[in-house]
Amino acid sequence: MSTGRVLWRLLSYQPGLFILNMALWTAFWLVPLVMGLVTRQIFNAITGGAAASGTLWSWLGLLVGVVGARVAINMAGVAAWAEFFFSRAALLRRNLLQRILSRPGAKALPDSPGEAMSRFRDDVDELLKLVEMTVDGVGIVLAGLAGAAIMFRIEPFITTVVLLPLTLIVLVVALLRQRILRYRRAAREAAGRVTDLIGEMFGAVQAVKVAAAEGKVISRFRVLNEARRRAALRDSLLTQLLEAIFVSSINLGTGLILLLAAGLIRAGTFTVGDFALFVFYLGLVTEGMTLIGNFSARYRQAAVSVQRLLELLPDDPPGRLVAHQPVYLRGPLPAAAAPERAADDRLERLEVRDLRYVDPATGRGLRGVSFGLRRGSFTVVTGRMGSGKSTLVRVLIGLLPRDGGEIYWNGRRVERPAEFFVMPRAAYIPQVPRLFSEALRDNVLFGLPPARADLPGAVWSAVMERDVATLERGLDTPVGPRGVKLSGGQVQRTAAARMFVRRPELLVIDDLSSALDVETERTLWERLFALEEVTCLVVSHRRVALRRADQIIVLKDGQVEAEGSLEGLLARSPEMQRLWRGEAGQESAGPGGTAG
Amino acid sequence: MAVSYAQHRQFLRRYLQPQWLRVVLLAALLCGGIGLQLATPQIVARFIDLARAGAEQAVLVRLAGLFLAAALAAQVIAALSVYASENVGWTATNAVREDLALHCLRLDLPFHNARTPGEMIERVDGDVTQLASFFSQFVIKVLGNVVLLVGILVLLFRAHWSVGLVYAVFTVATLLLLRALMERAIPFFKESRQAGAILLGFLEEHLSGTEDIRASGAVPYVLRRLAEAMRTQLEKTKRAWLRGTMMWATTAVLLVLGNALAFGLGTWLLRRGLITVGTVYLFFHYTEMLRRPLEQITRQMQELQRASASIARVGDLLALRSASADGPGMLPAGALAVEVERVSFGYVPDDLVLRDITVRLAPGRVLGLLGRTGSGKTTVSRLFVRFYDPTAGAIRLGGVDVRDVPLDHLRARVGLVTQDVQLFHASVRDNLTFFDPTIADARIREVLAELGLLEWMASLPAGLDTPIGPRALSAGEAQLLAFARVFFKNPGLVIMDEASSRLDPATEQLVERAVSALLRGRTAIIIAHRLATVQRADEILILERGAVLEHGPRAVLAADPASRFATLLRTGLEEVLA
């Protein structure tokens, strides 16, 4: 999708607002032309002798009036611009987030979230800057053109001689602009490396202290700081240089006018007023030409940003990035409720046939997995590390895209698992759940209307009731960014409560053991077993879960090694025996890394 | 936030003195630039008068040439002085960043446990960047503009005292008005920035949680919250922008009134023959020149307030002291004897995690430390490297109290391998050496060879240069790296919190070999999770609720069917320990 097309789609969103902004800002930039003309008349009146005194006062009054009008235009312009600017920012960000959230959850981003964040922030800003330049630019360029025309009418020779070198200078500057963007990016990257290191040195502070490596890490910090200083100075020097060229070109023009006009002023054909107007308009013309140069540089820069934003939406037609839709900056907000339960959502039987998935990085995955489960049953997926347990449940519910195989819900084929396995049909607890900086209550409800939710019941099922009681503000406690104010175990149980409160047909749980101590985990399992009418698909290697399982699926190297009840498997499957005795026996005594 | 004048001065002295030459150069550049800026309009005024009086062409051409030269020089000097000031600013603030980061790294663990890395980025980089304005912008934009303003007024006084007087009153009134407007606008700008930060925070968080959002069917909810956050940003920013426009508008209106005044007064003086047309032009030109200093001084005064807040916060951080003082003692060379003498410890007062523990371990012995989660195993390991000090009792290594030796020395002699291996996004080499470029590759190879890891290293795509990060390695590989880190120091005591997760057989074998190498000729305490490790131990100690439940030679305990250890061996570690 071309940059021009993106730009146009952004500009033309809400056409009324677009026209209003264009009109106000073009007017704003054209007013200085009038100010120049009035100033010229004022000087002419001053030098014109006592007879012109009367008109001097009316010209002065007009000057004040024109500036007053410009101030009024500016006020209206800023108000209109805020609406215009933020609705476009909102359109881009909403389109992006909406599409990202519709992709398989575990593969939603091309790179890390931090990296995606820089696209959401910097690349969106880059496009908005281009929008801003367009809205401002029309007026600025018109003012420059009109200014040059007026100068030409007053004194064609001087105008031609002055504007020619000016054009050359501006062209050179436009070329240098390219470099400035490069330097700026380099400076930003150098700054990024410094902040990354700060984050890491404090993230790994324990390791640094243990190694008594504080001094060494600071030496590294010094190197990066120095690189950042140099990059920033280079950027700044070039910016200053361009600024200097810009101002100097006006000065050069002024000097040329002085040189050329000396004779004319003496002869009286070029007045002081003409001179003042020329100096004033030189600024306008230079600004207009500079804008054209800047715009072309920005335009090329924006092409990179468009590309980077489109990479966030690999499955969509490019037009989706700038598709016009409401952004809800005014009026009622969109509905947030999850859909009501429908009759055919009720799970009777789930069947999986020949599910396949290959992880592009490791080459591991699922090599044709089939199984079935019935309403009300408890199914445990187990296996060694790397056998594909997590992958299986994640491919099943569409968090990872499957490479092959079929899924049947009550015998009906599921075409898009990612859209199908959501409330009210399924809910899921990942190994490392994420919380968001809201109150604990909102993290559990997560959009569910409170009227439809049994919050205390969900909290109890998740073994959170004692935590909630001891938290200072109970369920209203803000959990901090990513839930940092809670312990790892509390985060995991909050995610469990989030799942229970949704009362889904199918519960999918990916290994609760990573953050819970065994006692709490056991209680959680017991409360889960006590729930009526739940169907569970669980990844676990805990004996308490295995003992209760109606069905155990043993995975090995991405394939079903054995399947059946615990007793049967212990009798005939060597892999199961190994997992139960050997490996399960040697395994973790619980998370030892937490404060003793 | 009150910051004393002395605090500012101290800061300036500490960070500007080392580069005083640059500071002097900067001052010279600034003065030169301002002088030229003031001079160029004078040339134009003179030119106009001479041209109207019919002076000779040659004189006029010389004046025009002089104007060009002065204008160009002014621009070059302006660019140079910005460069010089930024250089001074960056050099100074980088020094502040480094001092601050080192200071914070040395602070105790409780300080770090209370703060996220993101917050530290804000404190070490964000606050200090604000300071940059104190070092550079303040000089250029405030001092420079004040001098420029005064210069303009002096020159106007020189042209005619009445004009000078009118302008002095006008300037002061404008500054006061702008200041008042700015004060009132500041809270709105704060709110706007806050709303922007909240929106970015919202996006960052939710981009990291796509899996949870999808799986909970919360997409409509999240999109609605996005709309809310953007709506708030629009509201707050619009208000802030309008306030900002008020300031611009005020300056514009005042300046046009000033212009009208200049023309009026100029004409009146001109008619009386007190000044020339060139001088009227001078008034006009200087009025236009007033705009920038007026605006910038106002803006910079606000920046300065923010910088003051930053100086206060940086000062707060620098004022924090580590609670653990140390002495000048030295630990003996070789394997260290361990004595834990009636040690009790609690992270918070009145809640003891360790109770009255006494343990002795002869040099070269290996102690296997067992206990349920929460029994205090990890806490014990932290006391040896003085992340915390015992509430009561003492820990002695080789007969010397750990509080009597310098921290660096202690941590060089005690190697701690934690389960959670903290890595940098950097090459394997930098992760091993903590970015120490003086450690030669040959030495690294030597260490890896000793640990039996040369082959493993060769299997990495780019050897020592392979970039890794916190999640790029398996748990086993991360532990191998941590062993190598310890090996660089040649410690007399090694404390290991074993990886509890299952390792694949290949890695497991590597880990076993490396542990053997690591323990040779050293005293060791191993927090054990696996049977293999327990077999390696000479002695076994079992902790329960922070107290010693059982301690003795492994063979003796294993042979005693009544011992807890024997029970553990019979039932397997998981079901009993957990």
Image (cartoon, rainbow, N blue to C red):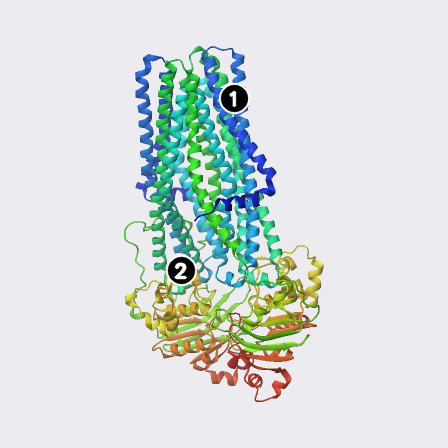
Q: Chain of mark 2?
A: A
Q: Residue furthest bottom?
A: B561
Residue B16 at x, y percent in the picture = 57, 42
Percent across and percent down for residue A101 are: 40, 58
| Residue drawn where x is 45% and y is 39% of the image | B300
Q: Could you say whether the residue bearing mark 1 is in a helix, strand or loop? A: helix
Q: Is residue B233 visible?
A: yes
The quarter holding residue A212 reads bottom right
Tell which of A161 and A485 is nearer to you. A485
Q: Give the left or right position of residue B456, taking residue B392 as reference.
A: right
At a point 28% along the width and 53% down the height, the residue shown is A332
A405 displayed left or right of A385 = left
Count all numbered tags in the image, as a single digit: 2
Tell me the amino acid under the disc marked 2.
Answer: Ser
Residue A507, percent from left and from top: 39, 72
Q: Is A137 on the left or on the right of B482, as rendered?
A: left
* Residue lying at 31% horizontally and 68% vertically, measured from the top left: A453
Residue B67: numbered disc: 1
Identify residue type, mark 1: Phe
Q: Residue B536 lies in what quarter of the image?
A: bottom right
Residue wearing tag 2: A437
Query: In the rendered structure, are the residues bearing label 1 and label 2 in contact, judged by CB atoms less than 8 Å apart?
Result: no
